[in-house]
Amino acid sequence: MTEQDIHPAIRGVLRTIGLLNPDLTDPLHAGLVQALHDLGPYATPGKRLTAMRWVFAWELRAAGEQFAKAKTAYEHNVDRRTVQLRGGEEKMSRAEAEQLARAEDEANELHLVYLLAEQRERAMRNFLSTIQSAQDDARTDRADARAASGAHAQGMDGGA
C-alpha cells in the first residue's frame, strides 16, 4: 500500500487523533493504517479506536525498549570514559572527568539518540492518552444517543 492508496475514511479517523499526514515508512503510522484497513469501512468508532490503541501499545513497548537501550548506551559510554580519564596520568576529580567524557563527540551523539528516543516514547504516551479521550467521547456520544432514543420512544421529545 502506498500513501496515495490510504482511503479517505482512514485519513479521517487518523485526523481525529492528530495524525494529519500518515507516513507509511514509520512503523506506527503503517500499523495504524493497516489496522483501520483490516477493520473495514463499517467498523464502529469504538472498534477503530480500540484497534489503534492496540497498535500504539505495541509500538509504545518497542519505543520504551529503544529508549532504555539508548539511555544505557549513553550512560555506559560516559561511565567508561570517566573511568579511563580518571585512570590516566593526569589526576582529576570524578566530576571533571565526567564533564570531559560528556563533552566528547561520541557521548554527544549517544545523548542525542537517547533524548530522541525519550521524546518518541513520551509523544506516544500522549497519543495513547488522546486515543483514550476519543474513546471516552465516543462512549459518551453513544450513551447520549441511547438516552435520546429512549426519550423519543417514550414520547418525551418535546413533540405534541
Image (spheres, helix red, strand yellow):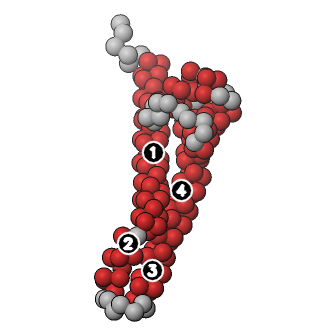
* Residue of label 4: 63
Q: What's the amino acid at mark 1?
A: Phe
Q: What's the amino acid at mark 4?
A: Ala
99, 9: nearer the viewer: 99
Residue visible at 38% across and 16% down in the picture? 157
Q: Position of residue 89 (x, y in %)?
A: 40, 92
Disc 3/disc 2 C-alpha distance (Å): 9 Å
Q: Is residue 48 above or below residue 63?
A: above
First of labels 3, 2 by sequence position: 3
* Residue of label 1: 127
* Residue of label 2: 102
Mark 4 surroundings within 10 Å by alpha-carbon count, few (fewer than 14), some (14 through 19), many (20 or more):
many
Dot 2 lies on which element?
A: helix
Q: What's the amino acid at mark 2?
A: Arg
First of labels 4, 2 by sequence position: 4
Q: In this rendering, does residue 143 appear at all?
A: no
Whether label 3 touches label 1, CB < 8 Å: no
